[in-house]
Amino acid sequence: MTAVTYLIAGMLVWGGIGWLVDHYVGTKGVFAGIGAVLGIGLGVYLIVRRLGA
């Protein structure tokens, strides 16, 4: 359950940050997509680092 939480939280947090950047820059979803992918990548990193999976 912890691993799933890391993935979802990373995607939501970094996707949200990307959405804010999109809002201020005036693009439509570019940075939100990049942020979501980055969040998933960082979530996987945390899973491997903390849980040793």
Image (tube, grey):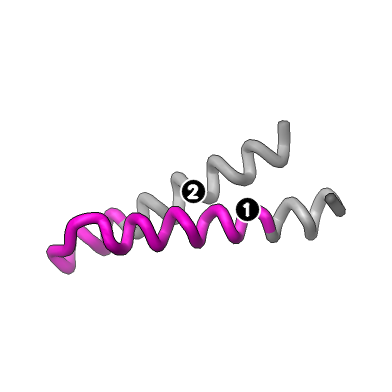
Q: Where are the magenta residues, as a range?
A: 19-44
Asked whether, in this view, residue 7 is left or right of residue 12, the answer is right
Side of 53 relative to 47 (left or right): right
Report which quarter residue 12 is drawn in: top left
Q: Which residue is mark 2?
A: 11
At 72% from the left edge and 31% from the top edge, which residue is drawn?
Answer: 1
Quadrant of the image occupied by residue 50 = bottom right
- Mark 1: secondary structure: helix
Q: Is residue 37 left or right of residue 15?
A: right
Amino acid, disc 1: Gly
Q: Which of pointers 2 and 1 lies earlier in the amino acid sequence?
A: 2
- 37 sits left or right of 46 in the view: left
| Residue occupying the far top of the picture | 1
25 within the magenta span: yes
Give the crowd class for mark 1: few <14, some 14-19, many >=20 residues within 10 Å: many
Where on the picture, by quarter, is residue 2?
top right
Q: Residue drawn 28% across and 62% down? A: 30
Residue 6 placement (x, y as % from top left): 63, 45
Disc 1: which residue: 43
Which residue is painted at 39% across and 52% down in the image?
15
Q: What SS does tag 2 mark?
A: helix
Say above or below: 34 vs 9.
Answer: below
Instruction: Single out the residue that lies furthest toward the left.
Output: 26
Q: Position of residue 24 (x, y in %)?
A: 17, 64
Query: Which amino acid lies under the numbered mark 2 shown in the image of this protein?
Result: Met
Is 39 in the magenta?
yes
